[in-house]
Image (cartoon, rainbow, N blue to C red):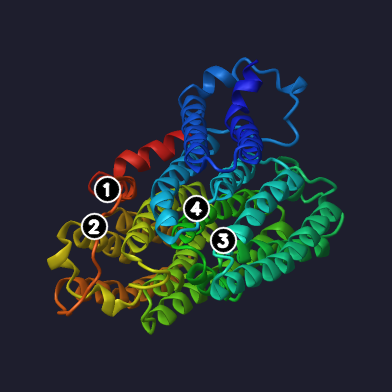
Amino acid sequence: MNELLLTSPIISISLLAVISLIFDAMNEQNKKFGYLFVQGSLIIGLVLSLAGLFNYYELVDYVNWNESYTKHSLNFTQVSYFFDAIFCIAGIFTLLASRPYLIRENVEETEYYNLILYAIAGMMIIVHSNHMLTAFIGIETMSLTFYVLAGYFRFNKKSVESAMKYFLLGAFATGFLVYGMAMIYGATGSMQFDIISSQIASGELNSILYLNLGFGMLVVGLAFKMAIFPFHQWAPDVYTGAPTVVTAFMSTAGKAAAVIIFILIAKALLPLSEVAEVINNTENAKTVLAILSAVTMLVGNITAVVQKNVKRMLAFSSVAHAGYLMMGLVANTAEGWKAAIFYITAYVFMQIGAFILVSIFERDKKKNLEFSDYSGLYKSNPMMAVMMAIFMLSLAGIPPLAGFFGKYLLFIAAIKAGFTWLTLVAVVSSVISMYFYIGLIKSMWFDEAEEGVTMENTSLSASIPVYLSTIFVVVFGILPFLLDDFIAKIM
């Protein structure tokens, strides 16, 4: 029974996703019921995730892990339940903003809400995985739903084009992922993360060549999921072509899931060891990741400088933030992983808030998306201009907001791990990002425009996640120890 309770977030979301699909087939006209059912499902998932998070030790102590049904495939940690809750919150925020957006665009279908639920089920499988095949199932469940959601505006050429690009490149990356897993299995004789880690740490490998090839292929596959250079080209086109509310969800919850699976694999393949051969292999791997991190930050921010479209700017910005997150993996320490978890948590709220604001401003399919459209926003909608400014300043890393402390923790972890040069690159990259983040603030607050974005008849449900995201960003910035100490406690 306790093991059933431990798996309840995954089971509930997966089961409710299937039930939602059946209800939709039986009563496809009642879109509001489909929306409310999926929203209720996410609230149930959130409650169960929080129950697992705060009653973790009580549940774990009474499970006989030798006779456990899930011991080889799933891993139950407080960090897993923490991210289960983050995914559910991101899903709830996305749905709150989605319904008015879809109704306004006259494209509301219950399948959209179902797909959000399936995507979150895949994300939960990812963060609980203790086996490469389990992780693969979670990754592909999430990815397949994203392919469909990216092309949700199926009568819009750009939306269909973005979905096709995403699907073709995603299938290509999946091939690398599968081959990488096969190579790791050939090198270690196992696909369980804990066994792989112990095999590598002890130096008892079938082939160091297979290990290196497998690691390289896994990096390629996961770099695509995180939009790491040079596998980032899909992100700007997909994020721009997809519905804005979908972009908000993909670029936050989806990136968080990708970061977690990268951490799980890095912890397994780059263990601390006294075996000379393994030490050299680990240092070489960390150097490769550091180079990818540095180039990703620079390319993402430099390319974002020349963008005039807000969605495209945020898309390239998302690429740069993937580079920042890589710094935690490069450090390969508990402090580095904690910093990455802090930053991705803060990033979820500041990025989803910014994209939902863009979806509120957007009108008539892709209008009000240029920087010039935001001119004079402070005069017409001062509260929304203030919140957008908060999100931009947090993404730029300005204190005292959550983004600043997230970057600070990543920089400290990288320096302690001996990657001072990477921190210097990150600082330069952050300075470059000031140009376009503050450029948008300048347009909103200081530029004059005959006709700017307006928010007449804005749904309250779309505004709620923006207000809540703003509160999280400010609170985690002013009182960062609340989140930092909590993450340290659950790791």
Marks 3 and 4 sit apart, C-alpha to C-alpha, by 10 Å
**Which is nearer the eye, 413 or 402?**
402
| Amino acid residing under circle 4 | Glu
Q: Secondary structure at mark 4?
A: loop
Structural crowding at the residue carrying mark 3, measured as other residues with C-alpha within 10 Å and reported as few (<14), some (14–19) or many (≥20):
many
Q: Secondary structure at mark 2?
A: helix
In the rendered view, does 138 fall on the left or right side of 263? Answer: right
Q: Position of residue 481 (x, y in %)?
A: 30, 42
**Percent x, y for residue 350?**
35, 56
- Disc 3 residue type (three-letter): Tyr
Q: Nearer the viewer, mark 3 or mark 1?
A: 3
Q: From the viewer's perspective, is 442 left or right of 7?
A: left
Reading the image, the residue beneath label 1 is: 467
The spot of residue 142 in percent (x, y) is 63, 51
Give the numbered dot on residue 152. 3
How would you rate the neighbour count of disc 2 (Cα within 10 Å): few for under 14, some for 14-19, many for 20 or more?
many
Disc 3 from disc 1: Cα separation: 27 Å
Which numbered disc, 3 or 4, marks the residue that appears first in the sequence?
A: 4
Q: Are marks 4 and 1 in contact (CB under 8 Å)?
A: no
Along the viewing direction, whichever of 363 and 71 lies nearer the viewer: 363
